[in-house]
Amino acid sequence: MNSDHRARILVVDDEPANIELLAGIFEDEHEVLFATNGKRALDLAASARPDVILLDVMMPGTDGFQVCEWLKSERATANVPVIFITGVGDTEGEARGLELGAVDYVNKPINPPVVRLRVQHQIELKRARDQLTRMAVTDGLTGLANRRQFEETLERENARLARTQGELSVILMDIDYFKPFNDTLGHVRGDDCLREVSRVLDETISRPADLAARYGGEEFGCILPETALEDAAAVAERVREAIVELGVPHPASEVADHVTASLGVATLHCQPRQSALRVVARADEQLYRAKAEGRNRVCAAGSAER
């Protein structure tokens, strides 16, 4: 969902007059995109991620039913509400559209107040669903992804990269001596520390495909698709340095007078039928090594695992 409560609406119709009418209804309140054929609609839906799609049934080439079927088969667009626009009083066709996953129908000639209310209803429903989804995959304290989202993203990226035998890197990180920090300064200060460290991660792990997550307690995990081992280690070092630069006092630390972190890095050459958990296990081994060697450091596996 776009910021400032503006939704992104994709209008798919081969009649310019209908597109102009619908744009006039919504453009003051929302962002309106349009396509005049099925192929362009599919491309826009995949790239622009609309919040609602208004889809004409009868179009030359790829018709609305085919477009809807494709949209519902793709992970990125499966949950986008589709409202069919039709001038054909065909109850059998309406049933087919609903079976394919459409949420509503709007008949031509278009009645502006009716279509506005129906679209607004779907926008509100999608906002509610999106909020529930975010809550299910977000850590409540830090705002980072939670462990569930970390594991789901890891499996998805591993499967995707296996098709090209690409590299998948993982960073695991612990805040050094965090339990003594809590015991000495209290859990409120501990929560503040977790938020500050999370902010550093969020700012440093910044590519769209990357993911920073709170893995549990004071442990964090980062997923870096299509990233070589040496590049992932460099990212981990930037994270470590940024945490040092925070300068959060840590009177109970045995390595510094401020908060520090230990990080382990590993990389997997993804292959079909290969478990993504292997790279997590190797990163965990490197994290253990970083702690054993004195903490406040990055340790990386000697080479990417095949």
Image (cartoon, rainbow, N blue to C red):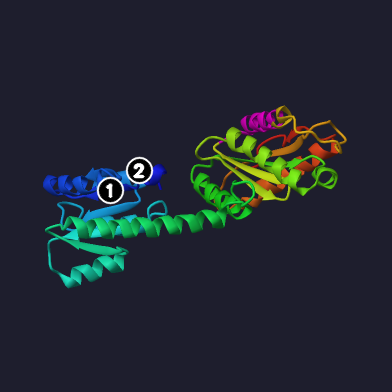
Quadrant of the image containing the C terminus: top right
- Tag 1 and tag 2, C-beta contact below 8 Å: yes
Q: Quadrant of residue 108?
A: bottom left
- The x and y percentages for residue 143 are 59, 47
- Of residues 108 and 285, the one nearer the viewer is 108
Given the image, on which type of amino acid does mark 2 rest? Ala
| Residue 81 seen by the camera | no
On screen, residue 274 versus residue 301, left or right, reads left
- The x and y percentages for residue 99 are 30, 69
Taking 120 as reference, is 160 above or below it? above
Query: Magenta residues, as a range?
Result: 227-242
Q: Residues within 10 Å of mark 2 (few under 14, many from 20)?
A: few
The residue at the point 85 percent across, 39 percent down is: 292
Q: Quadrant of residue 118?
A: bottom left
Given the image, on which type of amino acid does mark 1 rest? Leu
- The x and y percentages for residue 195 are 66, 42
At mark 2, the secondary structure is: helix
Q: Residues within 10 Å of mark 1 (few under 14, many from 20)?
A: many
**N-term-proximal mark, 1 vs 2:** 1
At mark 1, the secondary structure is: strand
The residue at the point 30 percent across, 58 percent down is: 82
- The x and y percentages for residue 233 are 67, 32
By secondary structure, the bulk of the magenta-drawn segment is best described as: helix
| Residue 303 seen by the camera | yes
On screen, residue 75 versus residue 240, left or right, reads left
The residue at the point 63 percent across, 46 percent down is: 142
On screen, residue 99 versus residue 249, left or right, reads left
Queried whether the magenta region covers residue 236, the answer comes back as yes
Q: CA distance from mark 1 to mark 2?
A: 9 Å
Label 1 sits on residue: 10
Numbered circle sitting on residue 57: none
Numbered circle sitting on residue 48: 2
